[in-house]
């Protein structure tokens, strides 16, 4: 099997609903993508945030640069710094915010709904 390479310059920018001051780039994912997981690189400007909402599927965050605040639906805040990770089970309500004066970047990794068997995709909807 060939190795799939995702050069950053070939990544596809997109704008997810409920994200403000965030510039994500899809590294693995998109309309014709058939891999098991998607990977996006999200850049949070100072003051950037993802609104309080549930994640659609199990999601992994890995902060690469900067500092981000991850707050759950109960208002419990966690500070994520470079190379800190977080695992959010499907349906976890969260907000992500950059409260600093420097940009922050993180990888967002989750299952690809298009690659799941129909029965598993229905469970995740």
Image (cartoon, helix red, strand yellow):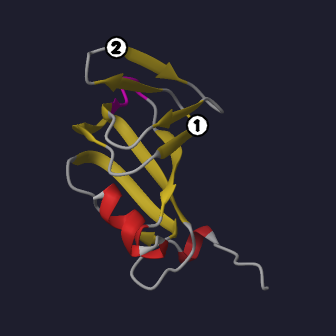
Residue at left 38%, top 74%?
Answer: 118
Residue 71 on the magenta span: no
Q: Mark 1 points at which residue?
A: 65
95 left or right, relative to 85: left
Answer above or below: position of 40 versus 66: below
Asked if labels 2 and 1 touch by Cβ distance under 8 angstroms, the answer is: no
Instruction: Give, as a single range, the part of the protein colored magenta.
Output: 96-101
In this orientation, which residue lies closer to the viewer: 86 or 113? 113
Q: Where's residue 82, x and y in %?
A: 62, 31
> Quadrant of the rendered structure where residue 12 is?
bottom left
Numbered mark located on residue 10 in the image: none
Question: Is 99 included in the stretch rendered in magenta?
Answer: yes
- What is the distance, in whole Å, between disc 1 and disc 2 at their CAs? 22 Å
Mark 1 or mark 2: whose residue is earlier in sequence: 1
Q: Quadrant of residue 74?
A: top left
80 shown above or below 124:
above
Of 90 and 18, the residue lying toward us: 90
Q: In the rendered view, does 49 fall on the left or right side of 62?
A: left
Q: Residue at x 70, y 78 (%)?
A: 4
Q: How crowded is mark 1: few (under 14 residues within 10 Å), some or many (20 or more)?
A: some
Visible residue check, residue 14: no
Q: Position of residue 69 (x, y in %)?
A: 40, 24
Q: Pointer 2: what residue?
A: 76
> Considering depth in this image, is 99 or 37 the residue closer to the camera?
37
């Amino acid at each position: 099997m060939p190795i799939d390479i995702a050069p950053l310059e070939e990544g596809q920018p997109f704008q997810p609903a409920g994200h403000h001051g965030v510039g994500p780039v899809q590294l693995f994912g998109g309309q014709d993508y058939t891999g098991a997981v998607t990977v996006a690189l999200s850049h949070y400007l100072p003051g950037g945030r993802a609104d309080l909402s549930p994640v659609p599927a199990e999601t992994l965050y890995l902060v690469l640069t900067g500092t981000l605040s991850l707050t759950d639906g109960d208002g419990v805040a966690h500070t994520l710094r470079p190379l800190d990770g977080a695992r959010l089970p499907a349906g976890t309500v969260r907000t992500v915010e950059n409260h600093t004066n420097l940009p922050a970047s993180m990888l967002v990794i989750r299952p690809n709904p298009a690659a799941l068997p129909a029965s598993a995709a229905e469970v995740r909807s």
